[in-house]
Image (spheres, rainbow, N blue to C red):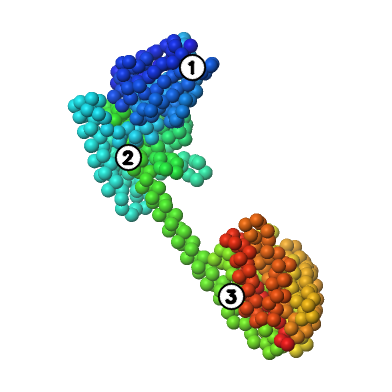
Amino acid sequence: MLKLQVTPSQGPSFEVAVDRDQMVIGRSMSSDVAINDRFLSRHHARLHRAGESWLIEDLGSRNGTFVNGARVDFATAVHPGDMITMSASVIRVQEEGASRPPAGGFDHPAEASLLRPASELLSMSTALPSAVEDPTGATIRRQAERLRILNEVHQALAGSIALDELLDLILDRVFVHLSPEKGAIYLTAAGGAVFRAAERPVGLTDDQFTLSTSLCREVLDKGMAALVHDLEADARFAEAVSLLDSGVCSLAAAPLTHAAGTLGMIVLSSSARRRVFSEDDLELLTSLASVAALRIRNVALAEEAAERRRLQEEVALARQIQLSLIPDQLPEVPGWELYGGNVPSRGVSGDYFEVIERLDGRECVLFIADVSGKGIAASLLTAYIVALSSAPIEDGLAPEEVFARVSRRLYRRTPTERFATALLGVLDPAAATIRFANAGHNPALLLRADGTTEHLAATGIPLGLLPAAEYTSEELALAPGDLLVLYTDGIVEAIDPDEQEFDLPRLEELCRRHSAETLPTIAEALERDLEAFVRGVPFADDRTLVMLRRAL
């Protein structure tokens, strides 16, 4: 058989034996368990048997019924050791014949400590009692005063302010209205660790505000407001010798809770000669903590917005620098058409291309590269590859020699997971030949004027993978009308909503279909086809295109 240990909001505790299959709990004397609590409904909840189980069911009360801090929205099983909270009253479920639980957990006697869901206290602070429930108007006056205080605190915290200044200001207002001897605000870090972010008086050492692990768990994890009436009677603080030696007797804690979760908590302490915190103090502290949480969250959001703006400015600057590296004008080579373009997926690109003349115009170099990764980190590595490759390209080295030199230095200076694929072609306009090396890059397309297509496959591994990679090159003759297409995988690996890739055959077919048109027209047609293909799916990678065609 069960028994209920009832601690009403007013009057002494009492016990009730559960000697029938259902019992109605409420404020009315007609209830099976009548509790002296003006904020209870007349018939607030029903405890009833279902087979071998016992269920508690809220009967449409105004302030709700809670089991272990969780609101009861439907009939909920209860067991010995559970705590049922209704308004300001607490009911502990026990086995018949069991002794009162010790003070080592949160099921200790109410005169030692009190736990209430913070959400319940906040709802109570806005609930207005009827004339019957509050004949003298004392409750209305108390709530009006609390609202005045909260409005004052709202105004005090409304300005633009840094987080540390905000926390200090919050504690200042708490001390004005609750007059504790010591107080601290604890915040939860990203990894879940709790740290003290502000305190009064300033300079408290850790041993002057030792906190119980179980108290942190109840306040931070469960959103409970806690009131310790007598520190010495609570076994959880038996090890906090410094607190007891300093004369601390009363302690109050409330979570800093907002819609998205709990940010931390406010903890206050006081000695018996100074004051002992009351339930009204706990309600006010919980309301102040709710205001504080809102302001702390707003400051955090403002700081996050400022950080996003700073990052956006850095990305914009990085993009400007990167654009200065990418040629905005290609050389004019008589008898040949050239095109190059880059579209980043994240503001800055891990792709790079270069088209330059060398050896007094006797050769034209086409260079395209794709660095592993995306964003700013990839763009930094791209800039490094540009620096490494510029001198050997301008010095007239063959494609395979350029790649061997760049790969060695890249391997020595970058992490092993950072590498790049690249394709470098050296055009001899007079001889109408191109010599190329492919460092693990996508195979270039050579669309012959006679309708055939050749793929310029890899002649070595990606740059930076091995300490001493070797590369080879191949040479091809280009006939009038032949079109060479270099590209990065952001084009062929673009996906549609069905996760199908644009792929190489589709790129080849498009280029073949528009091969008689100007190179910018082919690039525009490709972008249109890509946009139509992905149907709104964001491009996951940068897109770079370089084309060369021998005039007819």
Residue 248 placement (x, y as % from top left) = 34, 28
Mark 3–mark 2 CB contact (< 8 Å): no
Secondary structure at numbered mark 1: strand
Farthest residue to the left: give it: 136
User: How would you rate the neighbour count of disc 3 (Cα within 10 Å): few for under 14, some for 14-19, many for 20 or more?
Assistant: some
Secondary structure at numbered mark 3: helix
Report which residue position mark 1 lands on: 49
Residue 235: image quadrant is top left
Report which residue position mark 2 lands on: 288
Q: Nearer the viewer, residue 319 or 341?
A: 341
Q: Is residue 137 something that shows in the picture?
A: yes
Say which amino acid is labelled 2.
Answer: Leu
Mark 1–mark 2 CB contact (< 8 Å): no
Structural distance between the alpha carbons of marks 1 and 2: 41 Å
Q: Residue at x 33, y 25 (%)?
A: 41
Secondary structure at numbered mark 2: helix
Structural distance between the alpha carbons of marks 3 and 1: 78 Å
Label drawn at residue 325: 3
User: How would you rate the neighbour count of disc 2 (Cα within 10 Å): few for under 14, some for 14-19, many for 20 or more?
Assistant: many
Residue 36 placement (x, y as % from top left) = 30, 19
Say which amino acid is labelled 3.
Answer: Leu
**Eyeballing the image, is 52 above or below 438?**
above
